[in-house]
Image (cartoon, coloured by chain):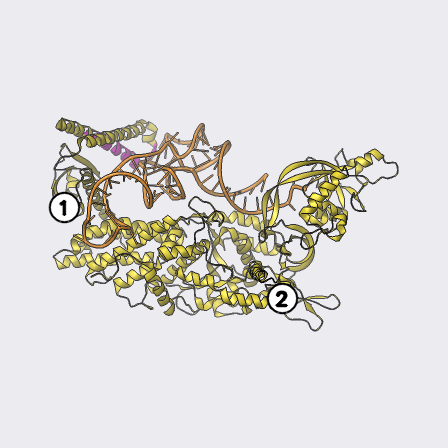
RNA sequence: GGGCGCGUAGCUCAGUGGGAGAGCGCUGCCUUCACACGGCAGAGGUCAGAGGUUCGAUACCUCUCGCGCCCACCA
């Protein structure tokens, strides 16, 4: 009879619903649609990518936010798109070429780019398609790409404008060079890794001067270095000017042992006298500190390496060697020349390219830079005055500190795939920065821009900037940026800087940082470790809802997200539970649709209680949604649906929906329909598929625009009723106690039996009002409530808010087990009483603690003592009976 | 070197200045008319350690130990 299958099968439901939503245009928004504008832009994934579990988390969060805002009546839009990902994409296509035995140089720039575009056309949409299976609801009609025509126009404008403002300049500066990729990198593309290296001590002989001591000259000066190969580019030795050991040598020169040149010993207080030998070899071309020192002393700058990290022609006998080989060769040559003094192991941090993994080479190079100071200051101000806030808040401080220490940003890359730099070089060496070529004879800069240069403009270029569009006016600034904390520096900071500069507004009001998805033991997922979880696989086996739920359940803001496949399985069970709650409703509602609640005087205790529980769950879940506190959202929904709605309310309401009295049944159905429907709405953003399927069945909605997606967000779903909850707790307490007996006595749930409960007046009154309910829930054939608390063997005392009751059970119980239990409970009660009594004996407590706390403690002590007495008496009685 | 986070049940984690919790796992019983992707019952914790504040600390402060992350141009 049921229209719904017994078990929820996501694969049968999800694709159809998604297609229906999309066809109905439910993802699409126009700037002049009704409602307060609300927007989110996707952190554009690399076109090369496919959906990994981190994307799944990031996009689930965005989807949940956007879906809820739509339901709240906002004119919400979520902009999808991809990033051209300069280095990553170029590498992928180069690898394909390599498989064909080709290089990009062989192809030439134009042909190579054509090839990348072709590849992008073919497989660039993969990840966005995969987002659909996850249930994501961006406005697909607004898809953008960081390297399309519109974005290119914006990038060029930004470059030209910043150049005109003096914020972009070309300079010969020390940059991070990736010798494998043969391009410059920015500082944040360098990862510092600890490396076991060597500190090599060697001597530079002094160049003799008139009157110098030949012995001292030969002994020279000993320096220490982790990079012996750079000595080929040394142009000075530096000592601390007040170092007694070396002061007399300042002004002398040393002779290079392998190259025909000499260079000076200089005094500079940059030198740390305590480190190494107190004398430092200076290589201005390959070390930032050395360069700074070199500038102070007018030193020569000798770049001794080539683009691919080999020693250059000026490296004498070492020319042509790879820098790693040169390191060993120089060391050997020093040893042979008798100049090697000592080699000691040395642990230190070495910068590696985050793109290719090879050690970065600091090199002096002609590159384009963004002068970040003025931009960073504006960004920091926006954070400090609260125009932008971070969730969680603790991300703020490191962000500000990072902005504070920011160096100029090297934005030129020696690649082909990317936005071309709009700088033109004239025949006479003149440089012009402008969108179009100045004319014949001018050639454009060969380099492209750092990928992040275009990504930083994303929140406004997706809305058509630099044009003044309706989209930009309606949806900018965006509401919240959802991203992992790991790219706050790469991306978030730069969007903030660019956004403030060009739009005079923040690009987003909230930065919501989530963590990284890890395995269930907090380990990073990696292919080599074999602990990678594929979200598409999870979706295929457990469904999108379960995958979303499992992710968000652990996704506390800013905290890494542990995930195990079993947990997704658990989430699926929850989805199935919700489904079956809907099935139950469907078969019992007898065609009734959710609508008005019956008047208060026709509500049963369980109705009033579940409405109170709904009220509390609604408040909790709503607040958690607002706070981006996903675990609390998930727990709140889970607890309400499973523990309260399914385990108690549905059981309780069965009595009445099956009642002969049609009016009674109808009232029960009304509440059931209302509560279930409200729960579906509250869960809809997180579990869009199962809730939609259930909601359609429940409401008879036709689909299309008649969708839960387009339904309104509950505002006052439940109603507070603390008294009902307290009264229902008495019912629950008694039912649980009976269940305990049943379990202990191994009485099957199907077997019904009569029960007599003796209780103190207050409790008896409550229970007497609900004998039918208790009997139904506890599976009793008959329930008698006696207003006279009696002590009897084989009974169980149940404390209730207003007093106690005792359950007397017919039949034989396991005396030994019961005595054991009574003993333990009595010990517990006595320990509790003793602890509370101790507290009450303390005059300071009685004086200083609030009166209600003291009163509660007194009651607690008395109750514990009484319970202990009861337990003792019952144990005695039971012992007597059993003897 | 600087900054941040975390140590609570076997595992993953909530939590609060006055009653130690959840999910999974584990044990026992149950084919109860929404669900065996289920129901009921149960076992299991010196809340890392020390000191301080307080009438009272798992919670607030300090320190110690352990784990993790980010940032950083000391050769």
Task: Identify the residue position indicated by label 1 in the image.
Answer: A771
Question: Which quadrant of the rendered structure holds the C terminus of chain A?
Answer: top left
| Local crowd size for mark 2, using a 10 Å CA cut-off: few (<14), some (14–19), many (≥20) | few
Which residue is pictured at 24% across the width and 49% down the height?
A647
Give residue A780's position: percent from left, percent from top.
14, 45
| Local crowd size for mark 1, using a 10 Å CA cut-off: few (<14), some (14–19), many (≥20) | some
Under circle 1, the secondary element is: helix
Asked which quadrant contains residue A366, the reply is: bottom right
Give residue B26's position: percent from left, percent from top.
31, 40
Residue extent of the magenta highlight: A848-869
Question: Which disc is residue A701 wearing?
Answer: none
A780, A257: nearer the viewer? A257
Q: Is residue A465 visible?
A: no
Residue A798 vs residue A173: left or right? left
Q: Is the residue A367 above or below the residue A734 in the image?
A: below
Q: Are marks 1 and 2 in contact (CB under 8 Å)?
A: no
Question: Which disc is residue A107 wearing?
Answer: 2
Q: Colour of chain B?
A: orange
A267, A447: nearer the viewer? A447
Measure the alpha-carbon separation of dots 1 and 2: 87 Å
Under circle 2, the secondary element is: helix
Pointer 1 indicates a residue of which chain? A
Q: Earlier in the sequence, mark 1 or mark 2?
A: 2
Label tally: 2
- Please, what is the dominant secondary structure of the magenta stretch? helix
Extreme residue in the bottom direction: A440
């Amino acid at each position: 009879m049921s229209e719904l299958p017994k078990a929820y099968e996501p694969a049968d439901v999800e694709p159809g619903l998604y297609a229906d939503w999309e066809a109905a245009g439910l993802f699409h928004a126009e700037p002049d649609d009704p409602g307060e504008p609300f927007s989110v832009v996707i952190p554009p994934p690399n076109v090369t990518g496919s959906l990994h579990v981190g994307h799944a988390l990031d996009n689930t969060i965005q989807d949940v936010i956007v879906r809820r805002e739509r339901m709240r009546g906002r004119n919400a839009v979520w902009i999808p798109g991809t990033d051209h990902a300069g280095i990553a994409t170029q590498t992928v296509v180069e690898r394909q070429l390599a498989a064909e035995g080709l290089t990009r140089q062989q192809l030439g720039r134009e042909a190579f780019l054509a090839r990348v575009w072709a590849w992008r056309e073919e497989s660039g949409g993969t990840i966005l398609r995969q987002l659909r299976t996850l249930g994501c609801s961006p406005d697909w009609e607004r898809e953008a790409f960081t390297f399309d025509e519109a974005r290119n126009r914006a990038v060029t404008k930004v470059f030209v404008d910043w150049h005109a403002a003096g914020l972009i300049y070309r300079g010969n500066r020390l940059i991070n060079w990736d010798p494998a990729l043969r391009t410059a990198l920015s500082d944040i593309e360098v990862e510092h890794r600890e490396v076991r290296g060597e500190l090599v001590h060697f001597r530079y002989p002094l160049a003799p001067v008139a009157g110098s001591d030949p012995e001292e000259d030969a002994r020279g000066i000993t320096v220490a270095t982790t990079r012996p190969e750079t000595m080929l580019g040394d142009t000075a030795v530096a000592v601390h000017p007040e170092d007694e050991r070396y002061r007399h040598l300042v002004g002398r020169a040393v002779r290079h042992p392998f190259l025909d040149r000499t260079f000076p010993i200089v005094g500079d207080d940059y030198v740390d006298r305590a480190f190494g030998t107190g004398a430092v070899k200076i290589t201005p071309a390959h070390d930032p500190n050395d360069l700074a020192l070199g500038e102070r002393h007018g030193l020569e700058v000798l770049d001794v390496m080539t683009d691919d990290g080999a020693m250059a022609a000026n490296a004498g006998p070492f020319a042509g060697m790879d820098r790693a080989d040169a390191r060993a060769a120089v060391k050997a040559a020093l040893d042979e020349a008798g100049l090697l003094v000592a080699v000691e192991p040395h642990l230190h941090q070495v910068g590696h390219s985050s793109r290719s993994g090879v050690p970065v080479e600091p090199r002096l190079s002609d590159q384009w830079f963004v002068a970040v100071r003025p931009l960073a200051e504006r960004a920091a101000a926006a954070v400090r005055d609260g125009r932008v806030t971070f969730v969680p808040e603790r991300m703020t401080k490191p962000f500000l500190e990072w902005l504070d220490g920011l160096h100029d940003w090297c934005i030129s890359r020696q690649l082909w795939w990317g936005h071309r730099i709009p700088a033109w070089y004239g025949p006479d060496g003149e440089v012009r920065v402008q969108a179009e070529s100045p004319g014949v004879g001018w050639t454009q800069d060969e380099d492209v821009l750092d990928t992040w240069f275009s990504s930083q403009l994303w929140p406004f270029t997706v809305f058509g900037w630099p044009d003044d569009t309706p989209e930009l006016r309606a949806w900018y600034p965006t509401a919240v940026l959802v991203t992992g904390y790991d790219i706050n520096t790469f991306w978030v900071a730069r969007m903030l800087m660019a956004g403030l500069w060009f739009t005079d507004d923040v690009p987003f009001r909230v930065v919501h940082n989530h963590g990284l998805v890890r395995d269930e033991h907090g380990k990073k997922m990696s292919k080599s470790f074999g602990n990678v979880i594929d979200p598409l696989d999870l979706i295929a086996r457990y469904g999108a809802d379960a995958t979303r739920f499992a992710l968000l359940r652990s996704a506390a803001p800013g905290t890494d997200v542990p995930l195990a496949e079993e947990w997704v399985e658990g989430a699926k069970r929850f989805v199935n539970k919700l489904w079956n709650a809907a099935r139950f409703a469907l078969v019992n509602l007898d065609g009734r649709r959710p609508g008005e609640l019956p008047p208060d005087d026709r509500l049963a205790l369980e109705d009033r209680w579940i409405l109170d529980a709904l009220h509390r769950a609604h408040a909790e879940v709503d607040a958690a949604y607002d706070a981006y506190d996903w675990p609390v959202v998930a727990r709140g929904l889970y607890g309400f649906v499973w523990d309260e709605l399914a385990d108690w309310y549905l059981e309780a309401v069965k009595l009445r929906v099956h009642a002969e009295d049609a009016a009674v049944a109808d009232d029960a159905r009304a509440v059931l329909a209302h509560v279930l429907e409200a729960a579906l709405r509250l869960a809809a953003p997180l579990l869009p598929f199962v809730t939609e399927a259930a909601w359609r069945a429940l409401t008879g909605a036709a689909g299309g625009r008649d969708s839960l997606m387009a339904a309104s967000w509950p505002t006052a779903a439940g109603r507070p009723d603390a008294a009902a909850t307290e009264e229902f707790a008495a019912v629950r307490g008694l039912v649980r106690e009976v269940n305990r007996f049943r379990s202990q006595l191994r009485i099957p749930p199907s077997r019904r039996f009569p029960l007599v409960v003796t209780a103190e007046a207050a409790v008896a009154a409550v229970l007497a009002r609900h004998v039918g309910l208790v009997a139904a829930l506890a599976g009793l054939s008959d329930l008698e409530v006696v207003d006279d608390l009696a002590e009897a063997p084989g009974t169980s005392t149940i404390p209730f808010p207003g007093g106690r009751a005792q359950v007397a059970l017919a039949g034989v119980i396991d005396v030994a087990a019961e005595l054991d239990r009574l003993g333990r409970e009595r010990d517990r009660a006595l320990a509790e009483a003793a602890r509370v009594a101790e507290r009450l004996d303390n005059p300071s407590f009685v004086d200083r603690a609030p009166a209600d706390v003291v009163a509660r403690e007194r009651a607690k002590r008395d109750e514990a003592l009484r319970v202990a007495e009861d337990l003792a008496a019952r144990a005695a009685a039971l012992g007597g009976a059993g003897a």
